[in-house]
Amino acid sequence: MFKKNLNSCINIFSGGKVRKLFILLFVPFSAQAVFQSLYQGYKGSDRLREIQVNKQIIQTDFDIGKNRFDWALEFSAAHSDSFLQSLISFQSQQTINQNYGFSLTKSSYHFGTLTLSHLQTDYDISNWASSSLYNFSGDKVYETKNSLGYRYEFLDKSLEIDWDILHKQNQADRKQYQLDIQKDSYDFFIAYKDAKLSILLDRLYRDNLKRAQERVDMVAQRFQDGLSRKLELEQAKFALLSQKELILKNKNELRQKVLIIENIIGMNFSQSDYDKVNWTFKPLKDYKFIYENDEFLEIANLELYNQLTELKLDKTYEQTSSSLALNLSYTKNSVEQEKSEAFSDSFSPGIHDEKKISLIYTIPLGSGQSTAQKKKLLLQRSKNLLSLTNRKSELEVQVKILNENLLRLEDGIGLTQEKIDVALSSVIEHKKLYARGQVSFEELLRSEESLINAKINKINMLALYETSLSTLAYLNGHIINFLNIYTD
């Protein structure tokens, strides 16, 4: 078995698909370790890793949102040939200028926008009247201007709400990630349970096939001895053929379910592996933790999305309401005939500066699009609330039913075992009586069928019991803990 597992792992690694954990090389299947070995394979599967990548994506999206307002560096260049009237000179002057500059801007969700800018302008004043610039003798003048600006919004708090939306979206995404992990883990267990059910039914059917063959041999011997009729022999053969047919039908279903598990974990099942699969009853007292539940994960997730809708609605109201912005700026410049002097003087103390303060009040006039957007969000909020209420009610009912079913199934499994014991005793007794000719073959056959049905009922009931256990663990957010301690 160890060699088989090792070869299987080598094939997988050589194919470029690392689909199970290294531990599988050293954990041969046993009656106690079948599920846990497969579960370790599932933990290293591509299927689970695909979901786990979402965790990194969620964190990356959050980082992108947090860094939405990084420092922004902007460069500019312009050429102008202007003959506009100028209030300063009280006459029109043809001015050709070229400017080069850059600005550094930093915005934030809560503290407004800060801007630093630097601008250098080259003026060609060769067409100016000589009296216009009495203190400059050349045709070129250079200006350097440095500015510091700040803008803060008092009324429109949409950016602050964006910050809240970013965090709420991250919480919702992380909660959804937990749900996705738990849902996939639950689906894996259900797939394993279905495969195990088919394996154990196949084992039971094969055991019944042996019993059917023994009946044929026994009746054939009695027929040769003249103690049984040919009809009884034909009935025994028919029962044998029916059992073979049942095995064939189950074989297709068995292979399909096992292939699902093999595909998930990248590991093959052999007939010897089937023989190690078992099913033992685990009482409810061993799983008390699955009943603990402060809040359904699904409900918590829906509540987060509902809160997200509320924030988006608040943002829409903010954006469609009036705004009041405060603008502050301080500018210092220098104009010289030498570019280097203009540059150095712009950073020196002096009287050539400008201080500005302004308030800008904006009243939005158009409301068509914003009204429709508000209506959509209000409808979405109503839908979310209804979905939240309905789903919570459904989950509470589902949990209540599961709790009741588990108690009934726990009692029922005990009863089925008693029925198996009684049916087995009945079969033994019927065989003795049939050998002495005291009961008919039909009575013997019915006793065998009762034993078969009792065993099948027990297996099906164990499957229902563990399905209910795992479903309750999943709904209450404990499926991972359930799988970590689960044994066959």
Image (tube, rainbow, N blue to C red):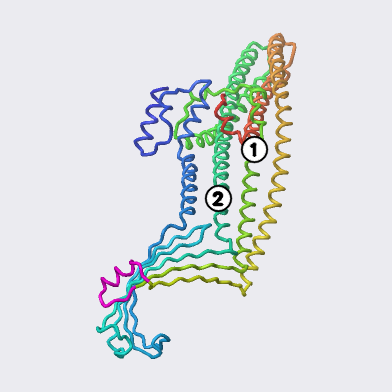
Provide the secondary structure element on which disc 2 rests. helix
Residue 29: x and y, percent?
48, 23
Q: Residue at x 65, y 62 (%)?
A: 376
Instruction: Using the rendered view, name the quadrant where residue 144 is placed.
Output: bottom left
Q: Amino acid at mark 2?
A: His
Q: Residue at x 43, y 72 (%)?
A: 354
Residue 33: x and y, percent?
51, 23
Residue 402: x and y, percent?
70, 34
Pointer 1: residues within 10 angstroms few (<14), some, or many (20+)?
A: many
The answer to which of 210 and 337 lies nearer the viewer is: 337
The residue singled out by tag 2 in the image is 167
Position of 88 with respect to 317 (left or right) is left
Q: Which mark is residue 354?
A: none
* Up-down relation of residue 394 to residue 238 (above or below): below
The residue singled out by tag 1 in the image is 475
Q: Is residue 347 magenta?
A: yes
Position of 126 with respect to 458 (left or right) is left
- Identify the mark nearer the N-term, 1 or 2: 2
Q: Which residues are magenta?
A: 334-350
The answer to which of 275 and 29 lies nearer the viewer is: 29
How far, Cα to Cα, is label 1 from label 2?
26 Å
Instruction: Using the rendered view, name the quadrant where residue 298 is placed.
Output: top right
Which quarter of the rendered picture does the N terminus lie within? top left
The answer to which of 175 and 254 lies nearer the viewer is: 175
Position of 449 with respect to 253 (left or right) is right
Residue 438: x and y, percent?
75, 11
